[in-house]
Image (spheres, rainbow, N blue to C red):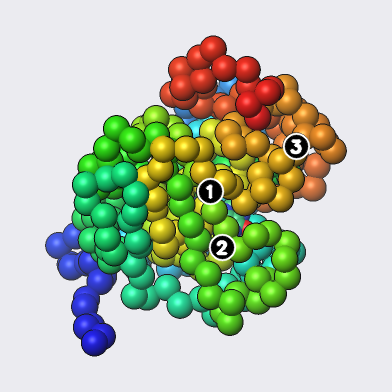
């Protein structure tokens, strides 16, 4: 039987959506005060970063999703910010990798609306006290959402800055009470071949699977996103719930999750199965380890001008939070 339930994210009048930083930016831009923006471009901006920020924010202002201010999710801002400007909404939702819908960057925006994302449940299996099938609303507390602005670095050497909305992965995983045998956690993407035209081709071994070591999954940065730019995730970005692991290459951030399994052995991962010498299990962003076919030393900034590049940082700039996870490990060998 299908039970219609009102969605927690529909909210009530009393749930006042906080004014996010990017709305402030937009308001200021609309008032024509480009100079005033400089002060808002976050953390320890060097002169050149600030300049960069102003130019990019000016661009961002005109391309933000118009509904952002009125509809959307209730959430709180956090200190997870980056020095560079946000990638415009049009680029975040229009330039995607979601191979289940095709391999071109435009395919997901074109075809992912065919995926049914409501109702949504996740099967939880393996070494944990609480397993079974859970409705999304029972796993993610829509009254406790936060915004985190993270860098996203694709292994293809391009990057974005995305304002995600969601909850820390650790908060969700802890509620399943994983046992000491749970040394890794595996994730699986939804698979419906009639809705996902890209799965007609054996590009990857469907369903898309990913995994993290348990201590990586419990790290403060690992995030389960249900939204971006203040609203629910567009399907092409992995609706209704996807992983965001900002210190790893983008393909670790698995979309449209339907299964979570606690396991004792390192789980198989889609890109590692497809090309083990090119894509390892860890896949930490590492400018010192070239991909066999291209350098990883720098990256193209999506949404900037055609030639906009930045240096790639170790762990995508998140060393302070995650370097300790890999103490003593050879990160070239364990790529
Ligand atoms: N299920 C699934 N998840 C996926 C992918 C995919 O093809 N299928 N692509 C990955 C890659 S390569 C990247 S770079 C990011 C892109 O996320 P975005 O489209 O939200 O920017 O999603 C990752 N998650
Ligand atoms: Mo990617």
Q: Residue sitting at 65 percent across and 36 percent down?
A: 280
**Mark 3 vs 1, N-terminal side:** 1
As rendered, which of 277 and 319 lies closer to the eye?
277
State yes or no: Cβ of the residue under disc 2 lies below 8 Å from any atom of ligand 1. Answer: yes
One can see residue 95 in this view: no
Query: What is the number of the mark on residue 210?
Result: 1
Q: Secondary structure at mark 1?
A: strand
Q: Residue 289's x, y, as percent?
A: 73, 25
As rendered, which of 275 and 300 lies closer to the eye?
275
Up the image or down, 260 lies above or below 7; here it is above
Q: Residue sitting at 73 percent across and 70 percent down?
A: 201
Q: Residue 11's x, y, as percent?
A: 22, 67
Q: Residue 74's x, y, as percent?
A: 27, 57
Label tally: 3
Q: Residues within 10 Å of mark 1 (few under 14, many from 20)?
A: many
Placement of the C terminus among the 4 image quadrants: top right
Alpha carbon separation for disc pair 3 and 2: 21 Å
Q: Check disc 3 and report the residue beneath it.
A: 277
Q: Residues within 10 Å of mark 3 (few under 14, many from 20)?
A: few
Q: Residue sitting at 62 percent across and 67 percent down?
A: 100
Q: Check disc 2 and report the residue beneath it.
A: 207
Placement of the N terminus among the 4 image quadrants: bottom left
Q: Is residue 5 left or right of residue 55?
A: left
Q: Is residue 313 left or right of residue 306?
A: left
Q: Secondary structure at mark 2?
A: loop
Q: Residue 122's x, y, as percent?
A: 35, 62
State yes or no: Cβ of the residue under disc 1 lies below 8 Å from any atom of ligand 1. Answer: yes
């Amino acid at each position: 039987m299908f039970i219609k339930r009102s969605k927690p994210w529909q909210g009530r009048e009393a749930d006042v959506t906080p004014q996010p930083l990017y709305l402030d930016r937009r308001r200021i831009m609309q008032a024509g005060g480009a100079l005033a923006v400089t002060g808002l471009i976050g953390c320890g901006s060097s002169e050149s970063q600030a300049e960069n920020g102003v130019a990019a924010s000016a661009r961002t202002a005109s391309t933000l999703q118009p509904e952002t201010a009125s509809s959307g999710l209730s959430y709180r801002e956090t200190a997870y910010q980056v020095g560079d400007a946000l990638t415009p909404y049009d680029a975040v939702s229009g330039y995607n990798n979601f191979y289940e819908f095709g391999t071109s960057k435009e395919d997901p925006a074109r075809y992912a609306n065919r995926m049914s994302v409501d109702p949504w449940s996740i099967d939880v299996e393996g070494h944990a006290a609480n397993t079974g099938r859970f409705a999304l609303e029972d796993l993610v507390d829509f009254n406790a959402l936060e915004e985190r602005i993270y860098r996203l670095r694709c292994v293809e050497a391009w990057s974005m800055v995305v304002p995600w909305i969601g909850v820390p992965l650790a908060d969700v995983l802890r509620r399943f009470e994983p046992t000491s045998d749970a040394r890794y956690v595996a994730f699986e993407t939804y698979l419906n071949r009639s809705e996902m035209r890209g799965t007609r081709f054996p590009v990857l071994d469907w369903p898309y699977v990913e995994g993290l070591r348990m201590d990586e999954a419990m790290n403060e940065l690992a995030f389960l996103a249900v939204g971006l730019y203040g609203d629910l995730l567009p399907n092409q970005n992995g609706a209704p719930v996807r992983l965001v692991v900002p210190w790893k290459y983008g393909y670790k951030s698995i979309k449209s999750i339907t299964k979570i399994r606690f396991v004792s052995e390192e789980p198989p991962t889609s890109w590692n199965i497809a090309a083990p010498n090119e894509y390892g299990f860890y896949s930490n962003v590492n400018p010192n380890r070239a991909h066999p076919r291209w350098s990883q030393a720098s990256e193209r900034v999506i949404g900037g001008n055609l030639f906009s590049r930045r240096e790639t940082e170790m762990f995508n700039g998140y060393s302070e939070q995650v370097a300790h996870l890999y103490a003593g490990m050879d990160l070239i060998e364990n790529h």
